[in-house]
């Protein structure tokens, strides 16, 4: 009887997690809508501790991610594919394209998944645990922990009324160091072709806070895969 009771509790918990995830996808237009995202192109403005910047991002689902940001007259580039990564960071002493370490490239895998860690999470090798309910800015939110197959651990907060994701933290091991990135997510809008995406994200990492405002978001815009190739020197 005890074993049966334990199984019932586990089953109930799994159903609760899946119910939250299903409502989250319903708020975004449905799982089929989310799954139909093949590419994403974003133009954005950034406030980085008072310094203004702008940039663009390209994502090809499960294949590649590239971000270019113009800051103080310098261009920063981060580019990941499903096999490697490279970057240009003048503020870190790198003015030419530099290959990433395997850990750095691995940390970028989540950024190229347009469906997110909750979509078909079991098939992706991810596990999701419900940690309970908390109050964020006066509103109830469900707190979920995701252990990804790729390595990073994600804690996400889903608004209990809108069912949008409003906050997350990502812990990843990069070159032997655990890096934690926090995000506050808001201002969800529909794109011209009916995809629901957030237009404001506040990112905190290593004591630095970056406020990002999307100016343009285009879903399924054609992308030339050559832009993800590391330039030859």
Image: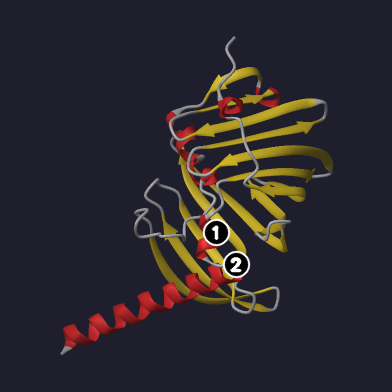
Q: Which residue is mark 2?
A: 29
Q: Residues within 10 Å of mark 2 (few under 14, many from 20)?
A: some
Q: Which of the pair 110/196 is nearer the observer? A: 196
Relative side of 77 to 8, left or right: right
> Which label was assigned to residue 149?
none
Of callouts 2 and 1, which one flags the residue occurring earlier in the amino acid sequence?
A: 2
Q: List x then y, in percent, for residue 165.
A: 60, 65
Colouring mode (rainbow / by chain / secondary structure / one colour): secondary structure
Q: Which residue is mark 1?
A: 34
Mark 2 and mark 1: Cα distance apart in space: 7 Å
Above or below, comparing residue 199 to residue 63 in the picture: below
Q: Which of the pair 135/28 is nearer the observer? A: 28
Q: Residue at x 65, y 59 (%)?
A: 195
**Tag 1's secondary structure?**
helix
Contact between marks 2 and 1 (CB within 8 A): the answer is: yes
Q: Residue at x 15, y 90 (%)?
A: 1
Relative side of 115 to 41, left or right: left
Q: List x then y, in percent, for residue 166.
A: 64, 65
Q: List x then y, in percent, for residue 224.
A: 60, 30
Above or below, comparing residue 85 to residue 4 in the picture: above
Residue 48 visible in the picture = no
């Amino acid at each position: 009887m005890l074993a049966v009771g334990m199984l019932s509790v586990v089953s109930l918990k799994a159903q609760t997690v899946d119910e939250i995830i299903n409502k989250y996808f319903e708020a975004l237009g449905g799982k089929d809508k989310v799954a139909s995202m093949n590419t994403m192109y974003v133009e954005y403005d950034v406030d980085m501790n008072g310094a203004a910047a702008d940039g663009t991002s390209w994502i090809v689902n499960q294949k590649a991610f590239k971000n270019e940001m113009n800051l103080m007259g310098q261009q920063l580039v981060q580019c990941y594919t499903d096999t490697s990564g490279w970057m240009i960071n003048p503020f870190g002493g790198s003015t030419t394209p530099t290959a990433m370490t395997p850990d750095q490239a691995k940390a970028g895998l989540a950024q190229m998944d347009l469906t997110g860690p909750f979509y078909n999470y079991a098939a992706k090798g991810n596990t999701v645990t419900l940690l309970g309910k908390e109050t964020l800015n006066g509103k109830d939110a469900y707190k979920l922990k995701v252990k990804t197959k790729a390595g990073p651990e994600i804690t996400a907060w889903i608004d209990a009324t809108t069912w949008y994701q409003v906050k997350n933290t990502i812990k990843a091991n990069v070159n032997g160091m655990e890096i934690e990135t926090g995000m506050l997510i808001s201002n969800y809008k529909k794109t011209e072709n009916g995809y629901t995406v957030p237009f404001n994200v506040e990112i905190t990492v290593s004591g630095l806070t970056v406020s990002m405002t999307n100016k343009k978001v285009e879903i399924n815009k054609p992308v030339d895969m050559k832009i993800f190739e590391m330039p030859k020197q």
